[in-house]
Amino acid sequence: MIKTVLFRRPSWMRAGLTALGLLALASCADRGDPDALTLGSLTTGSTTATLTLQSDWTSGYCANVTVANGGTAPTTGWQVVINLNQSTTSQVWSANGTISGSTVTVSPLAWNAAIAPGASTTFGFCGSSTGTNYRPTLTSVSGTGNGGGGTGSGGAVGSGGNASGGTTGTGGTTAASGGRGTGGSASGGMTATGGRTASGGTTASGGVTASGGMTASGGTTGTGGAASGGQCKLPWAANNGTGSFTYYSFGQGSYKDNLGYRTACGYIGAEPNGQSSDTIANIANPAYFAAVPGVNNFNTVDHCGACAQITNGSKSIVVTIVDECPYDGGQNAPCAANPTGHLDLSYSAWAALGYATGYPKNTTWKYVPCPVSGGIVLRIHGDPSWGQVYIENELLPIVSVRTSTGASGTHAQGGFWQLPGSLAVGQTLTLTDTSGRVVNAKIASTDQTANVSSGVQFPMCM
């Protein structure tokens, strides 16, 4: 039996936007991010780390760390150490994080180890409070290849107030004091209507990690990690000066049930405290996601799980495509005006880019491999007898799914893959990505409330 449930926004949310309405939305949004707060900054040699609180709902928070290169040569590597104080975290996105007690030691991924002079890279994490002093603080930062010197140390603002200044690091300069900043992310932006929602799966807590590394067919298994996979190919062209952006939030009208908000690609989202707290499970950065223009009943479903790198001057982030930007019927004029170059961003992604205008046009962005951590997640939709499975946390979009008997699946509008027959624990699915690479992943659970890593991942892209 094939069971498909598609959810659409309420009629009031899908109404057309007049020119006056667009202007009003842009004006309301041009106030910046009121929740952003700079918790502290440390400098060692030519490398600076700045910790910013993106959202805070007392029982938890999400934070970003920007690592900047003030030297005259690119970095060859960097490291940031964070004290979680009275909080815990399970995942760092856009970087490698090693957690030991309340200390998180962060190092770059292959794609962001080299930071050009005057440029920066950003990683992030979310935490859960275990006490009143739950806000994180920077402990140290270091950089190599750019005259970064040794590791500096210093304080950042905790929940109780300003921290004292940092001490001098070996071979580096004195760390900046951790005074409370005013923060301030991007100047507003026009709020666009959000993505059409679809049937989904279950709410997942954080990311997934495969013990002892991941294996990938089609390459040699690396020690404690994925195999090298050569050059990766994406079938879509870059938008060099031809892109445009708006932002949206789940609270605008996305369908919600007891499992969370549902996106058109089937991902499950949460919004614990307003638009700046929106997150999605099983993507590279839970707070950075986007919707692409939907055409002809969302035939852009093949973009689900793809990642896009967006650049605004020295600021650069990676978002995951999880949703549809309503296109038909004039429901989102910017989306309709640029069907191959427009992205409707999550509010946190928008704020991190620091745009000065409400509706930036002539922007630059391109599709890239996703900087995910952990294994691919095979998440069952509904009852196992339906034969429907979501494939999430992959490096590149999936173009083909086959069973062990060779039967092929179909990518449905709800974002899931429709396979013949029932699904069972231990069943192997053969996945092919946009570069033609193949891995064999086993279903770890048929409980639609479960969120379990398959323990395998595609080879890393060169």
Image (spheres, grey):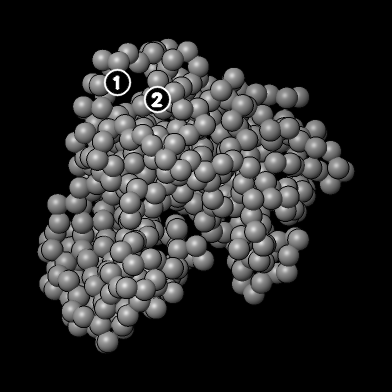
Identity of the residue furthest to the right in this view: 405
In the rendered image, is residue 188 in sight?
yes
Q: Looking at the rendered structure, which numbered label has been put on residue 134?
A: none
For mark 2, does the 10 Å Cα neighbourhood hold few (<14), some (14 to 19), or many (20 or more) residues? many
The answer to whether 69 is drawn above or below residue 301 in the figure is: below
- The image quadrant where one finds the N terminus is top right
Q: Amino acid at mark 2?
A: Pro
- Along the line of sight, the residue nearer the viewer: 377 or 304: 304
Dot 2 and dot 1 residues touching (CB under 8 Å): yes
Q: From the image, tell me which residue sits under label 1.
A: 22
- Residue 321 image point, x, y percent: 51, 39
Q: From the image, tell me which residue sits under label 2.
A: 334
Q: Amino acid at mark 1?
A: Leu
Q: Which secondary structure, mark 1?
A: helix
For image coordinates 65% across by 59% down, the residue present is 231
- The image quadrant where one finds the C terminus is bottom right
Left or right, 86 with reference to 342: left
The answer to whether 316 is drawn above or below residue 305 in the figure is: below
- Along the line of sight, the residue nearer the viewer: 194 or 76: 76
- Along the line of sight, the residue nearer the viewer: 456 or 188: 188
For image coordinates 19% across by 51% down, the residue present is 183
Left or right, 55 with reference to 178: right
For image coordinates 70% across by 61% down, the residue present is 216
- Residue 278 image point, x, y percent: 37, 40
